[in-house]
């Protein structure tokens, strides 16, 4: 059978092996998925090992998403724009890098929205790797405007630059400004780790001026409901946690490797069981 893997450090708590192995069983593909704990100094050897061991495909997670890139033979356009790879396909010894994180998020957002995402005013909180993935996918999807707020406002500049390249109007706004004009935004997306366990009482942004019809998203899935989402819900807003993004990025990787779509409801169930 084929072997698939996850390259990360640490990988002990990853839910990826469970959901992919279940999907292989379910569909009847003879394959196994294993989490490989790769120390940062061995990233190059690990990627060369994919070829040497004829591993069919890999996911890549923290902290290796950028480091693996220089050892790949080809990088897909979206992954290149994001500047990070979370999926490697071994095509007869040629290693191709993709990034399914951003698209996974956009899919989960579209599934929750009743109206067209393209007509929405969006505010992104954070400017790190996760923010760049989500921003890129949103812009490739065709959103008309993006605002970015971040604790360190200058760090939003590369995303504003990327928006120029992709011809999407974008601006960086500081936290005070974002909070004051929060009612201008239809969709608010937290990409920072603020509110993640164990600091579950922290908020990345004050929601005092949130409008009732807004959709508030958090990429965090542990806890399932961050303080940000709790407060948003209390204000009457629709909320989206990070489970959908996690499941969708996995399903998109699975499609790259196997050419078939796994059952995302099963994946979601396994994730919720493991978290709950
Ligand atoms: P990731 O790949 O998960 O995005 P990252 O690239 O390290 O991780 O980016 C972390 C993001 O979370 C940044 O936007 C960071 O803000 P700064 O650019 O100011 O560092 C944000 N972040 C992390 N901890 C934070 C905190 N305690 N308060 C506010 N923002 C925080």
Image: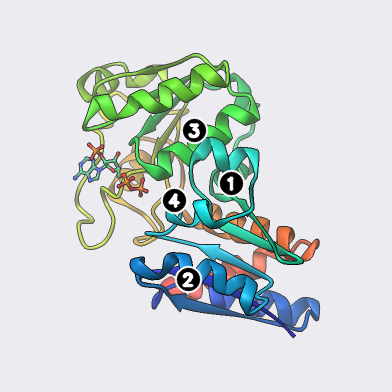
* Circles 3 and 4: CB atoms closer than 8 Å: no
Name the mark nearer the viewer: 4 or 2: 2
Residue for badge 4: 66
Q: Which residue is mark 1?
A: 108
Of callouts 2 and 3, which one flags the residue occurring earlier in the amino acid sequence?
A: 2
- Residue sitting at x 57%, y 15%: 167
Instruction: State the mark number for residue 45.
Output: 2
Q: Going by the image, does 119 lie left or right of 179?
A: right
Mark 2 or mark 3, which is nearer to you? 2
- Residue 138 locus on image (x, y percent): 56, 32
- The quarter of the picture where the C terminus appears is bottom left
224 or 4: nearer the eye? Answer: 4
Mark 3 sits on what residue?
135
Q: Earlier in the sequence, mark 3 or mark 4?
A: 4
- Residue at the image point whose x is 64% and y is 53% from the top: 73
Image location (x, y in percent) of residue 146: 46, 22
Q: Residue at x 54, y 20 (%)?
A: 165
Query: Which sits earlier in the primary sequence, circle 1 or circle 2?
Result: 2
Q: Are marks 1 and 2 in contact (CB under 8 Å)?
A: no
Of badges 4 and 1, nearer the viewer stands: 4
Tell me the quadrant of ligand 1. top left
Give the secondary structure at mark 4: loop
Considering only order in the chain, which callout, 3 or 1, is on the residue closer to the N terminus?
A: 1
């Amino acid at each position: 059978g084929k072997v698939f893997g996850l390259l990360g450090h640490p990988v002990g708590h990853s839910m990826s092996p469970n959901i992919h192995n279940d999907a292989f069983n379910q569909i009847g593909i003879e394959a196994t998925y294993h989490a490989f704990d790769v120390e940062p100094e061995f990233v190059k050897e690990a990627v060369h090992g994919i070829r040497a061991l004829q591993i069919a495909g890999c996911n890549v997670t923290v902290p290796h998403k950028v480091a693996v890139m220089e050892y790949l033979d080809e990088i897909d356009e979206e992954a290149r724009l994001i500047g990070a790879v979370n999926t490697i396909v071994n095509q007869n010894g040629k290693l191709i890098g993709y990034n399914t994180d951003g698209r996974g998020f956009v899919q989960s957002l579209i599934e929750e929205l009743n109206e067209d995402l393209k007509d929405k005013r969006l505010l992104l909180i954070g400017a790190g790797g996760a923010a760049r993935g989500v921003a890129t996918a949103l812009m490739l999807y065709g959103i008309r405007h993006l605002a970015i707020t971040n604790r360190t406002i200058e760090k939003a500049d590369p995303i504003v630059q990327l928006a120029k390249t992709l011809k999407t109007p974008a601006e960086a706004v500081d936290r005070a400004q974002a909070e004051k004009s929060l009612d201008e935004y239809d969709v608010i997306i937290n990409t920072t780790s603020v509110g993640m366990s164990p600091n579950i009482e922290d908020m990345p942004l004050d929601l005092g001026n949130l409008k009732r019809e807004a959709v508030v998203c958090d990429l965090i899935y542990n806890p399932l409901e961050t303080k940000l989402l709790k407060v948003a819900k209390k204000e009457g807003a629709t909320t989206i946690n990070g489970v959908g993004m996690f499941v969708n990025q996995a399903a998109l990787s699975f499609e790259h490797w196997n050419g078939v779509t796994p059952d995302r409801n099963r994946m979601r169930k396994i994730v919720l069981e493991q978290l709950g």
